[in-house]
Image (spheres, coloured by chain):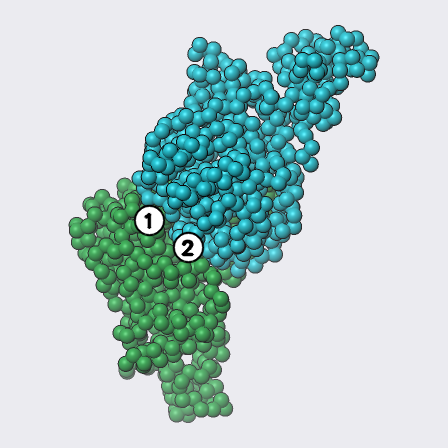
Chain colours: A green, B cyan
């Protein structure tokens, strides 16, 4: 059901919020018309990019004057909901048309040690004196989706029926039925693997950690896309590895040219990338560039650690191929989990370690032993019965619509010149604000309002991306979210005013 | 209820099994008497070390001749169930009196790299074509204990009542209520820690791995007791660490003299030991030696990784103190879990990292992120309601009685000259067979019978302990177990006959 997007999932109330536009009185006729049109857009009568009826048609249909109809359209245009195109009329805003993407990153061109654990810790330890009012900073999916409920039933059922002997040590590679379901899921990304090539792990985090440990020794250099997931960056830190951050484009992904230069210049032991529904930039590399990346790694005989944890949340159907799909000699180690698609608290992930299976099993054994048994059977059942496919379909739709809404809000409330990513999947938005902005200072300011964003420097080994930040838009958007984004935008604007 | 031990928990059938003793006919009167006396011993009317009625009393009570009564006693003596003491009469066998302990170990006196992953893998991967008939080789506790049932109810309840939002990422250190319960539990070993000094981990394995990673770099030397848990040895292997195996006594534990010499001679980065209910040797170091060990580490400014995973299963009440109880400057990192006391498949452990808390949290984050949420609340509740204390008490009793039974069987069926440990807790027996015995060859032979033991060399970095093996006696012992032990003993005897 990928047939275009309505502007917003949220109720029409949104449009009653003060928006900075000169709307004087609730009683006015044009306001009623504005709400009516807005509601049609919400309901999907008109979708992103659709042409609206002309002002003249609207007059006739509603029996109002041209002045009133024009005021109605002007109000929605001012709110960023619709846009006028010369000689073509009004269209429902497609946010991508309005806001430029973040610029191609330009990290340090040398291997550096990773730092910033203190800031990451504050974000992930969960020890903040006040929980933020909105989960804008973290990596949590929407846990309230109706399509998740069958999983809860299956978990309860299996728990009730389980004899305690099911809590023995599991086989080291994990539940066979779950591994079979995972190979099915992987086949949707064009990657065909045998169930013996899959190891169940304690979340994607353990899969990445195992892959890194078996490929590197402390002091080694690892090439990464940049910005990159702070959890992966901290793994480099903990292992004493150096990150070589490769320039990365918000639309096309890691620069293959820069990567090739780096491979010629530095003794790179592994390439760690998130090529599909990238966190935080949102892009998916196209097939040709993925194929070229794998070929490049083959030519330089380097292994690739592929973080595919958001890949199943690509808005396009069928989902984009993984790097592993182009891998012919087992050099791609694919890491994923159900933490972004189902429930992160299950800590259920997997590693498809390619040619490194034996070492990977060893690393798995010494890392945590076998995995927890409780949830594996239930998740396998959830997948086998088709619940997982239904859930993914629902979440892709929800996240796509919410992406559009969040981009609209960012466009409305953030400082002029703010660039924003156009994610191809997942539930993360990456913002690049104008020169002079400091995302860490913003967070300090937001703490007063019990709000928090993920500041850019966490996503860099070298302290880059100070004027960037990441927003999570997984939870259903409502008036509170709207008000929060508006407040964050106001704070950012205020900070830049002080600077200039 | 630590009021002595009956010789056996198993039914009286045990004594009807052919036992190699010259018992000719089922119809004989002395056999009936033998069974009657055996049954009384089972039922605890007479316990380990108790004096039995005299032959004369037995004649009177049963109305039989002296010859018949003597035949009855002789039969039980031949089976090892009772023993004659000169001028004192017959006593219920206390196995410790019969069988010498394994000799003090004499490992290589230099740091060595660990190997043997292939054998460990075969044991832990769970990929054997046939599951062994008895869990004699692995580290599984008894999962069928009645005192575990409340935990199953709590797990089901919490699952039914949980909203899916409870499956969010947990705080990195783990559930606060569980950590509070863990500090209570730790206080029973004399170790007082704040809940902020406890980090919930994915089993004891992750706790040990985190501790090792934060204290060492590849190439470093770690001093270990020897023999030692193969999982810990494999951690050294995976991290490229060298093991310096310290001579260890089956009664008193690691040799402090040898350790001191080693600390003077080698650049030791950490000491990794299991001082309470040691796996595989079963000893618990006494308080004075524990205090001296901590003091030795302090003098040489080395950290101690304490594996306390079997400590709560000490047969004595109150349980022995942990090393951490003697630690005054946070250099002991205590690692434990519920895998030996409750259910290993929960993968629920903890690390009390002392002065290393910040680095430990970092290592935890990059290893697996936060821990799985599902079981933490239920286990905390199980502990808070007193179920855990009741369960521990029941298991200590069960394992103590089964220890005695297993030692008796080993004494009966294994080659003369076999030495066997006298564990002070837990459910593992360590056997040392005469010169010429090969435990790995034995396992190959046992595979035909779908039986398996844990061969000695797995517990060494340097391939020692070829003539040793470990037996698990956690599951309730029955005729099948009896027959299995007998068969293993026969195979061992046959192997030694061929050798000699």
**Mark sitting on residue A331:** none
Q: Image height check: is A211 above or below B259?
A: below
Q: Nearer the viewer, residue B11 or B412?
A: B412
Q: Residues within 10 Å of mark 2 (few under 14, many from 20)?
A: some
**Horizontal relation, residue B200 to residue A281: left or right:** right
| Residue A10: % across, % down | 47, 73
Q: Residues within 10 Å of mark 1 (few under 14, many from 20)?
A: many
Q: Nearer the viewer, residue A433 or A78?
A: A433
Q: Secondary structure at mark 1?
A: helix
Picture quarter containing residue A404? Answer: bottom left
Label 1: chain letter: A
Q: Image height check: is A319 above or below B343?
A: below
**Mark sitting on residue B358:** 2
| Residue B175: % across, % down | 53, 55
Q: Disc 1 marks which residue?
A: A239
Q: Residue at x 53, y 60 (%)?
A: B165
Q: Is residue B343 visible?
A: no
Q: Residue at x 30, y 70 (%)?
A: A467
């Amino acid at each position: 059901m990928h047939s275009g997007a309505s502007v917003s999932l949220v109720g029409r109330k949104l449009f009653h919020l003060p928006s900075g536009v000169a709307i004087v009185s609730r009683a006015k006729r044009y306001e009623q018309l504005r709400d009516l049109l807005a509601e049609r857009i919400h309901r999907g009568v008109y979708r992103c990019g659709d042409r609206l009826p002309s002002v003249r048609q609207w007059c006739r249909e509603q029996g109002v004057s041209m002045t009133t109809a024009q005021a109605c359209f002007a109000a929605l245009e001012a709110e960023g909901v619709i846009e006028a195109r010369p000689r073509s009329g009004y269209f429902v805003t497609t946010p991508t048309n309005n806001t430029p993407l973040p610029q191609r990153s330009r990290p340090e061109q040398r291997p550096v040690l990773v730092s910033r654990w203190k800031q990451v810790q504050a974000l992930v330890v969960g020890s903040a004196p006040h929980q933020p009012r909105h989960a804008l900073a973290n990596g949590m999916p929407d846990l309230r989706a109706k399509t998740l409920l069958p999983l809860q039933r299956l978990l309860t059922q299996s728990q009730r029926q389980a004899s305690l002997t099911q809590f023995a040590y599991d086989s080291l590679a994990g539940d066979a039925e779950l591994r079979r379901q995972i190979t099915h899921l992987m086949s949707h990304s064009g990657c065909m693997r045998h169930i013996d090539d899959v190891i169940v792990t304690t979340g994607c985090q353990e899969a990445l950690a195992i892959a890194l440990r078996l490929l590197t020794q402390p002091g080694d250099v690892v090439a990464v896309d940049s910005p990159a997931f702070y959890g992966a960056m901290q793994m480099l830190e903990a292992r004493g590895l150096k990150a070589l951050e490769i320039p990365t484009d918000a639309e096309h992904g890691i620069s293959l040219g820069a990567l090739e230069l780096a491979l010629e210049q530095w003794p790179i032991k592994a390439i760690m990338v998130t090529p599909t529904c990238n966190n935080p930039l949102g892009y998916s590399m196209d097939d040709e560039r993925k194929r070229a990346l794998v070929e490049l790694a083959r030519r330089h005989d380097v292994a690739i650690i592929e973080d595919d944890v958001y890949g199943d949340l690509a808005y396009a159907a069928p989902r984009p191929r993984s790097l592993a799909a182009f891998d012919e000699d087992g050099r791609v180690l694919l890491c994923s989990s159900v933490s972004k698609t189902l429930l992160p608290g299950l800590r259920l992930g997997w590693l498809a370690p390619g040619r490194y299976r034996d070492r990977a099993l060893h690393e798995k054994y010494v890392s945590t032993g076998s995995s927890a048994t409780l949830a594996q059977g239930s998740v396998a059942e959830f997948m086998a019965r088709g619940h997982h496919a239904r859930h993914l379909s629902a979440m892709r739709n929800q996240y796509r619509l919410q992406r559009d809404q969040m981009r609209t809000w960012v466009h409305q409330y953030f400082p002029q010149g703010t660039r924003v990513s156009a994610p191809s999947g997942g539930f993360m938005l990456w913002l690049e604000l104008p020169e002079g902005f400091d995302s860490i200072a913003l967070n300090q300011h937001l703490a007063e309002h019990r709000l928090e964003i993920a500041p850019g420097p966490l996503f860099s080994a070298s302290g880059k991306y100070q004027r960037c930040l990441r927003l999570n838009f997984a939870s259903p958007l409502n008036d509170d979210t709207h008000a929060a984004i508006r407040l964050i935008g106001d704070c950012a604007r205020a900070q830049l005013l002080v600077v200039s």
